[in-house]
Amino acid sequence: MRTLPRRVGARTPPRRIGLAAVVAAGTVAALVATAPPAAAVERPEYQMPFACGERWEGSTRSTHSPSTLSVDWNRDAYDSGQPVVASAPGVVTDVVNLGDQSYGRYVIIDHGGGWTTLHAHLLASYVVEGQRVDQGQTIALLGTSGGSTGPHLHYEQRLDRENRHAFFDGQGFVYNSWLTSQNCLDVPVVGDWNGDRLTDVGVFVRRAVEARFRER
């Protein structure tokens, strides 16, 4: 049988591989478009910036700078010189003294994941930049430095340098109210707890309301 020559200008059928590639590309694009958003950064387990059992009033106002989410802490007429402690473990990134301007003497702690806390209008600071601190560790003394009109602690919880609603002991803080600090450090203890004449290790779990022993 004689094979007829192809006509000049005749159309070539489309290659199937090209269609498959288009379908594959479309599938990838659809997967990218429907990918779930990145998970939110978990908030640190913040506690109040004061020692276990202390009761303080945290306030704000409509003109509070830099944000109404900032907290001004007061307790009584003897606030000046009271210890300020770390709300969570972290690394000190800023120890600054602006004199009689703005925050005055302040400390910033980085808690990871973009979360930081700021403590301002301090009388004195007891940490240095780059220092690692534990939750409940004393970092400063409350004062009235900078643009303050009286002794108090100006406190901020930030995510990526933006103020966030303050949380303490896992609960959102109700602004302009009193709160008791649960910033209580667990204390390791040893003893013969079960009478077998061997040393056992336990933990004294401190709480502002109640305390208990836990054997390990």
Image: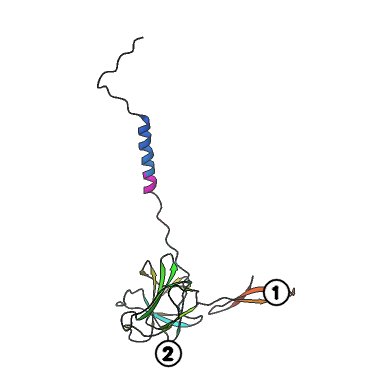
- View extreme (bottom): residue: 77
Label 1 amino acid?
A: Thr
The answer for how far apart the CA atoms under marks 1 and 2 are is 44 Å
Of residues 91 and 30, the one drawn nearer to the viewer in this rendering: 91
Q: In the picture, which quadrant includes the N terminus? A: top left
Which region is colored magenta? 29-40
- Asked whether 115 falls inside the magenta stretch, the response is no
User: Badge 1 local density, few (<14 within 10 Å), some, or many (20+)?
Assistant: few
Residue 149 against residue 86 in the figure, above or below: below
Q: Position of residue 126 (x, y in %)?
A: 45, 81
Q: Secondary structure at mark 1?
A: loop
Of residues 179 and 216, the one drawn nearer to the viewer in this rendering: 216
Task: Tell me which colouring the rendered structure shows.
Answer: rainbow
What residue sits right under mark 2 in the picture? Answer: 78
Q: Position of residue 92 (x, y in %)?
A: 43, 73
Residue plotted at (38% across, 41% down):
27
Q: Is residue 180 visible?
A: no
What residue sits right under mark 1 in the picture? Answer: 199
- Asked whether 33 falls inside the magenta stretch, the response is yes
Q: Secondary structure at mark 2?
A: loop
Q: Position of residue 118 (x, y in %)?
A: 39, 75
Q: Is residue 75 visible?
A: yes
Residue 9 against residue 23 in the figure, above or below: above
Residue plotted at (41% across, 52% down):
36
